[in-house]
Amino acid sequence: MPQLFEPPRYIAVEGPIRVGKSTLAGILAERMNARRVLDGDESPYLAPFYAGEEGAAFRLQMHLLFERYRQLRDLGPVRPSEPVVADYLFEKDKLFAYVNLSDSELAIYNRYFAQFRRDIATPDLVIYLKASPEVLRQRLGRRNSAAERRVADEYLEEVIRAYDYFFFHYTQSDLLVIDTSEIDFVERNEDLQELLRRLAEPIKGTQYFLPLGSQ
């Protein structure tokens, strides 16, 4: 049967910490034979930031902004023959900046962000993975990361609210929103297969995926 729609060639997977975005991006990249772009979220400023060190938020945010810009700029135009799957969206950086930076720091940050954004391609499709604070806290607890275990509940909830607000207003790409609180596409193959079937169908505008596992 002929294919009735043009599949997305550039997909970005987004969501808060430990929601499963890197895992899903890896699965999609393998199935699409696509280039995988990993978020360069490792930084020498990450541990000081989680520890609440003064000035660490600004240093971390500017470091990640430059690294993400460099990585996505070097992609160049995305060609149909060379699909791309990224486990982050460039605008995510700004979302965290508004959560973590002071007004004076934001004024400096925004000047760089606006200049960098002009050189970055926009994805055809963004997949937003979300989960409840309780589920994310459980997943953080399973990680062998002392820094992540120090993430305060209040901060985690603020990040989730920021993500929800951002994607409620997001219109730059087609968007699929998936609540992963009641499903596990890493551990349950049936959840993964259902999601992959949905991604094989057209997604226009903003749509929501309600897997059978959540009913």
Image (spheres, rainbow, N blue to C red):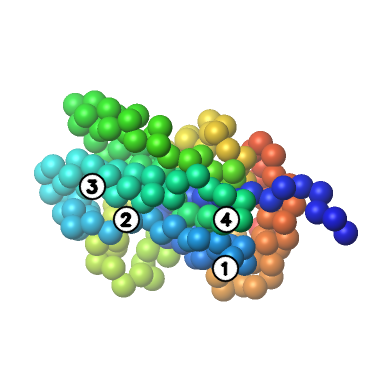
- Which numbered mark, 4 or 2, is in the foreground of this view? 4
Residue indicated by mark 2: 41
Q: Could you tell whether 156 is left or right of 122 in the image?
A: left
Q: Find out whether the residues at labels 1 and 4 contact each other: C-beta distance under 8 Å.
A: no
- Which numbered mark, 1 or 2, is in the foreground of this view? 1
Residue type at tag 3: His
Of labels 4 and 2, earlier in sequence is 2
Q: Could you tell whether 162 is left or right of 176 in the image?
A: left
**Where's residue 65, x and y in %?**
29, 43
Residue type at tag 2: Asp
Residue indicated by mark 3: 63
Of labels 3 and 4, earlier in sequence is 3
- Which numbered mark, 3 or 4, is in the foreground of this view? 4
Residue indicated by mark 4: 83
Q: Could you tell whether 191 is left or right of 159 in the image?
A: right
Residue, x 59% and y 45% (percent of image)? 125
Q: Find out whether the residues at labels 3 and 1 contact each other: C-beta distance under 8 Å.
A: no
